[in-house]
Image (cartoon, rainbow, N blue to C red):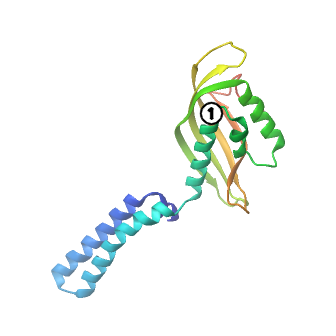
Amino acid sequence: MRTLLAEQPLIVAFMLGAIAAGLILGWMQTGRKWLALGGLFSAALVPLAFVLAAYWETDGERIRAAIERTAAAVRDNDIDRAVLVIEPGQRDRIAAARADLSRFRFDEARVSSIRGIQFISGSYPPEAEVDLTVSVVVSDRRGQFNSLRVPRRVVLQFRQDTVSNEWFVYDYNHMPVVGNPDGFSPQR
C-alpha cells in the first residue's frame, strides 16, 4: 500500500475519484447529506495523493536514485564517485570495481531500463536485488577499440545501512543482455 501511495499517485487519484463520484451519485439518488460530504471529502483527497507522492521517498526510489548517480559518475569517468554506491566495508568489491572501471573510458553510460527491484522479505538489514539493462559507449584504455556501444545486463545486490538508511551495493554482476556471462563479466 505504501508503494502504491508514494509511487502511483495517478492510480490512487483515480480510485479516490471513483469513490467520490459514487458517493455523490448516491447523494443525488437518496438525498442523504453524509454521502455528499463523503464524496466531497474523497474528491478533496485527490490533490493530496499527488502531494504525498511528491514528498514521500520510498526505498525503490532511493535505489533508483543511487543507480542514476552511479551511471552519471561512470559517464563522467569518475571512478571515486562511481564506487561510492558499494558498501563501505567491501574493500575487495570496491577494488574489483575500480579495476573493472579503470580498464575503459566511458563516453556514455545510461540506464536503459530497470527490469525489476525485488525486495528480499525477512532480511535484516533490508536487502534488494535489482536487475537492469544499461547502455554504454566505451573505449579501451589500451586503444584496442574506440567508441563501441555495448548494452549490458547488470544485477545488483543492495543492502540498506540501518543507521543512514542509504542503500549500498554489496555484490554485482554484469553480463550480456541475453545469455551467460562473457569475458568482460566479473569472474566469480
Q: Could you tell me which residue is drawn at 68 percent across and 12 percent down?
A: 144
Where, quadrant-wise, is the C terminus in this rendering? top right
The residue singled out by tag 1 in the image is 76
Based on the displayed image, in which of its 4 quarters is residue 135 positioned?
A: top right
The relative height of residue 107 versus residue 34 in the rendered view (above or below) is above
Give the x, y percent position of residue 112: 51, 35
Give the x, y percent position of residue 30: 18, 84
Give the x, y percent position of residue 46: 35, 68
Q: Image check: 164 left or right of 11?
A: right
Give the x, y percent position of residue 138: 62, 23
Instruction: Residue lying at the far top in this picture: please name it.
Output: 144
Q: How many marks?
A: 1
The relative height of residue 1 versus residue 32 in the rendered view (above or below) is above
Q: Image check: 6 left or right of 161?
A: left
Q: Could you tell me which residue is drawn at 64 percent across and 39 percent down?
A: 155
Based on the displayed image, in which of its 4 quarters is residue 70 positioned?
A: top right
Kind of residue at badge 1: Asp
> Quick one: 55 or 78, which is closer to the camera?
78
Callout 1: helix, strand or loop?
A: loop
> Quick one: 79 or 42, which is closer to the camera?
79
Based on the displayed image, in which of its 4 quarters is residue 37 positioned?
A: bottom left
| Residue 186 visible in image | no
| Residue 28 visible in image | yes
Q: Could you tell me which residue is drawn at 73 percent across and 62 percent down?
A: 162
